[in-house]
């Protein structure tokens, strides 16, 4: 079996899973109503459960968000979404009961579709909440429209549903704190802070050269995987993952023309410049928001991916301190599992490196990237 076949096999979606997902995806309003019915049925059990200082990990894909979620989810007080929560995401308590009463054999860890060495099982933490956002914000991934939700944004029905959903997830897990990995929440930080004033935000960032190399590598891999297994493309759309692949969509930070130019660069085959400009646009917007909002700045910890390599213990300790969690045991367990990448190296030409520098240097300097920092990766 070729390496390409092995990697695309990870994108295979069994027919049964596809049909079950279809039953949920085809009737989002029905499932929202069922979620409300579930909340009412659990009213007495939810009364004493509050959403206390939720932790949101949000950054451009391939910046280290999975590492950070894995670490946070290992803390005994933290509940996070798992792969197995989909497609029953709208009714987490009832879906959990169905799974509990229909046990399956223990799944062996397998490498995830990203082919980056990270082993997962159905119970591994993962970004799953985006399906909830899409049910209430149908244009959430339209590149022609701003995806920014700030402190003035309001959607009462979503806010009620979302808050109740988090309370039900805490009930299911028997935990007191919620942690989320959702890259699209990057443009919703101020909205989330209005909903949860004590929320803690964690934003991973990565050196542009290595970050863009990783993004391009994943984009190619996902295009191959989704071309070979068309149900994978449908699945990615349903869970709200548009970072790579055949339906790749950038986040519009409020400048439709700038987003259109990035899309045009990708379509013309100028991938390096397109990704570099996208990196710069997203992070420049983020830096501006943090600089202009003192409350958001206090609630946000920016973690450079490279710092995890240079001093993982200290960086993870800062993470737990910011999240207001006791993480001594977790830090000790995880710090030794972060190391320099071994499975690939950026292969840019000198001209492409110059393009990346041209597009990103000014913004990268706002995050302390004034030298050739080493890159790092994660092993499970």
Image (cartoon, rainbow, N blue to C red):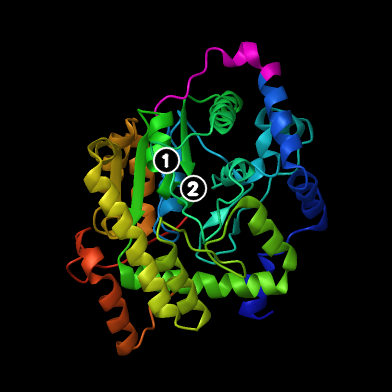
- Quarter placement of the N terminus: bottom right
Please give left or right for residue 367 compared with residue 215 in the image. left
Q: CA distance from mark 2 to mark 1?
A: 8 Å
Image quadrant in which you'd find residue 343: bottom left
Please give left or right for residue 93 compared with residue 220 in the image. right
In percent of the image, x 78 and y 54: which residue is there? Answer: 18
Foreground residue, 137 or 31?
A: 137
Q: Secondary structure at mark 1?
A: strand
- Label 1 neighbourhood size at 10 Å, few (<14), some (14-19), many (20+)? many
Q: Is residue 376 visible?
A: no
Horizontal and vertical percent position of residue 55: 41, 36
Q: Is residue 280 visible?
A: yes
Name above or below for residue 203 compared with residue 376.
above
Is 317 within the magenta? no
For the image, the number of numbered tags is 2
In percent of the image, x 37 and y 84: which residue is there? Answer: 348
Start-end of magenta stretch? 40-53
Name above or below for residue 75 compared with residue 46.
below
- Label 2 neighbourhood size at 10 Å, few (<14), some (14-19), many (20+)? many
Foreground residue, 250 or 304?
A: 250
Q: Are marks 2 and 1 in contact (CB under 8 Å)?
A: yes
Horizontal and vertical percent position of residue 62: 43, 61
In percent of the image, x 71 and y 74: which residue is there? Answer: 228
Name above or below for residue 369 compared with residue 84.
below
Is 44 within the magenta? yes
Horizontal and vertical percent position of residue 181: 47, 46
In percent of the image, x 56 and y 26: which residue is there? Answer: 160
Residue under circle 1?
Answer: 56
Residue under circle 2?
Answer: 182
Horizontal and vertical percent position of residue 159: 53, 30
Image quadrant in which you'd find residue 52: top left
- Label whose residue precedes the other's in the sequence (2 or 1): 1
């Amino acid at each position: 079996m070729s390496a390409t076949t092995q990697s695309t096999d990870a994108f295979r979606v069994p027919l049964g899973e596809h049909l079950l997902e279809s039953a949920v995806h085809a009737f989002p309003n029905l499932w929202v109503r069922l979620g409300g019915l579930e909340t009412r049925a659990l009213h007495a059990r939810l009364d004493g459960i509050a959403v206390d200082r939720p932790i949101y990990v949000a950054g451009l894909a391939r910046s280290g968000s999975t590492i950070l979620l894995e670490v946070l989810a290992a803390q005994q007080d933290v509940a996070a979404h798992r792969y197995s929560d989909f497609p029953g995401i709208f009714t987490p308590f009832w879906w959990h009961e169905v799974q509990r009463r229909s046990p399956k054999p223990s799944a062996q860890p397998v490498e995830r579709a990203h082919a980056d060495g990270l082993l997962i099982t159905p119970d591994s933490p993962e970004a799953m909440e985006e399906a909830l956002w899409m049910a209430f914000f149908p244009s959430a991934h339209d590149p022609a429209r701003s995806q920014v939700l700030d402190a003035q944004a309001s959607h009462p029905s979503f806010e009620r549903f979302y808050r109740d959903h988090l309370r039900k997830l805490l009930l299911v897990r028997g935990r007191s704190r919620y942690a989320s990995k959702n890259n699209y929440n990057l443009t919703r930080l101020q909205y989330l802070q209005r909903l949860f004033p004590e929320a803690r935000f964690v934003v991973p960032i990565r050196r542009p050269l290595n970050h863009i190399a990783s993004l391009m590598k994943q984009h190619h891999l996902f295009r191959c995987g989704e071309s070979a297994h068309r149900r994978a493309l449908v699945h990615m759309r349903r869970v709200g993952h548009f970072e790579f692949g055949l339906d790749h969509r950038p986040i519009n930070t409020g400048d439709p023309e700038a987003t259109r130019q990035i899309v045009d660069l990708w379509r013309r085959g100028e991938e390096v410049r397109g990704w570099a400009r996208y990196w710069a646009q997203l992070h420049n917007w983020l830096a501006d928001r943090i600089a202009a909002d003192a409350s958001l700045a206090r609630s946000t910890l920016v973690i450079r991916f490279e710092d995890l390599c240079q001093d993982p213990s200290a960086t993870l300790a800062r993470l737990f301190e910011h999240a207001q969690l006791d993480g001594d045991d977790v830090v000790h367990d995880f710090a030794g599992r972060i190391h320099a990448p071994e499975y690939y190296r950026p292969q840019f030409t000198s001209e492409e490196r110059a393009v990346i520098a041209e597009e990103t240097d000014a913004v990268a300097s706002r995050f302390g990237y004034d030298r050739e920092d080493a890159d790092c990766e994660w092993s499970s």
